[in-house]
Amino acid sequence: MKRRDFVSKLGLGTVAGAGLLAACGEKTTQQDKSGKDFKTEYQWKMVTTWPKDFPGLGTGANTLARLIGEMSGGRIMVKVYGAKELVPAFEIFDAVSGGTAEMGHGASYYWKGKSEAAQFFAAVPFGLTAQEMNSWLYYGGGMELWHEVYEPFGLVPAAAGNTGVQMGGWFNREINSLADLQGLKMRIPGLGGEVLKRAGGTPVSLPGGEIFTSLQSGAIDATEWVGPYNDLAFGLYKAAKHYYYPGWHEPGTTLEAFVSKKAFDALPEDLQSIVMSACRIANQDMLAEYTARNNQALYTLVNEHQVDLRRFPDEVLDKLRSLSDTVVAEVADKDPLSRKVYESYKQFRDQVIDWHEVSERAYLNARG
Ligand code: CA
């Protein structure tokens, strides 16, 4: 929506509106405290790690851009670019840091090459759920640490989406014991991949677009992706028989938005608040969408496509959990900032586990 349309929806004609502003005096109505004016219109580019309009993730980035435009009455218009449209997926961090675009949308674990600590703001194996991530970030000191990690790159971060608990993945053989993980070639990125490796498997890194054919041809034995909504759209049920849960490696992945600090600082205060508030809305909205659509898609996979839904055996989950503790703790040894983030995350996790034992888990068990 253009600013003019927004003003006319409020019933203020352009001429009458301008007269009103002029009558009130320039300083109080056209500038904020720091002297930045309310009239400048900003055209921003948002680069993303997702294919354009990719369900859930790409559409979540679109939602964020739309919200910023609407909430600002058109004073910031954000154009969204899918992966490769302006820069390749894994170059968006540098693109915004370097000023090629004002804003990015991705997942912080992609930037572990920039800072190992970044991984804690997306997902770690056997870590926080979506609800717990938001609590840590907004009320547990996580957001302040995230700012500290991105500050050297000239970026202002925000949580801007969450997938909820992901699925364990698609397997073309049964996983009945630890022995079945030996030599298992699985597409699973990041810390989860490292855990699988220590359990005897072979983690493979593949972009989304190559997963289906690799699984179908037998180049890999298994893959994780996201959850029923995205996995159904990819047709993964046609390439592997067994669908395992839970997604121990990604228990509530936070998606991020980041803004160039230079572009952010140039905004008047009301627009800064609007950008951050829009991220907060987008963060909640994506989780609500995933929860609704995953639940529909799981029903379709099981009832229409006769997918074999299985829980990982306890023996396997127990081993993966203890290996994860080691792998995640090793991140803390990489540098002092990673240790600081790890300690904050771990302390929050240990405490919230106690609370959720008597609240969320007790209730879900009682509900049956
Ligand atoms: Ca995943």
Image (cartoon, helix red, strand yellow):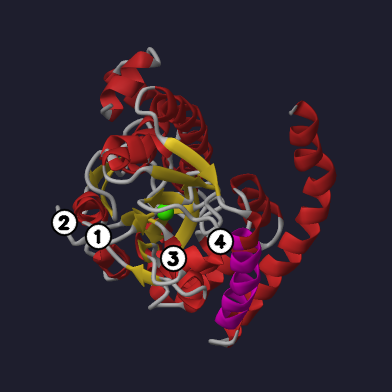
Q: Nearer the viewer, residue 324 or 8?
A: 324
Q: Is residue 288 magenta?
A: no
Q: Are marks 1 and 2 in contact (CB under 8 Å)?
A: yes
Along the polypeptide, which appears first: circle 1 or circle 2? 2
Q: Residue furthest left?
A: 85
Tell me which numbered mark, 3 or 2, is placed earlier along the sequence.
2
Q: Earlier in the sequence, mark 3 or mark 4?
A: 3
314, above or below 112, in the image: above
Q: Residues within 10 Å of mark 4 (few under 14, many from 20)?
A: some
Query: Regarding mark 1 in the picture, which secondary structure is present there?
Result: helix
Identify the main secondary structure in magenta. helix
Q: Secondary structure at mark 3?
A: helix
Residue 84 - label: 2
The answer for how far apart the CA atoms under marks 3 and 4 are is: 29 Å
| Residue at mark 4 | 177
- The circle on residue 89 is 1
Image quarter for ligand 1:
bottom left
| Residue at image point 74% right, 34% down | 364
Q: Is residue 324 shown in magenta?
A: yes
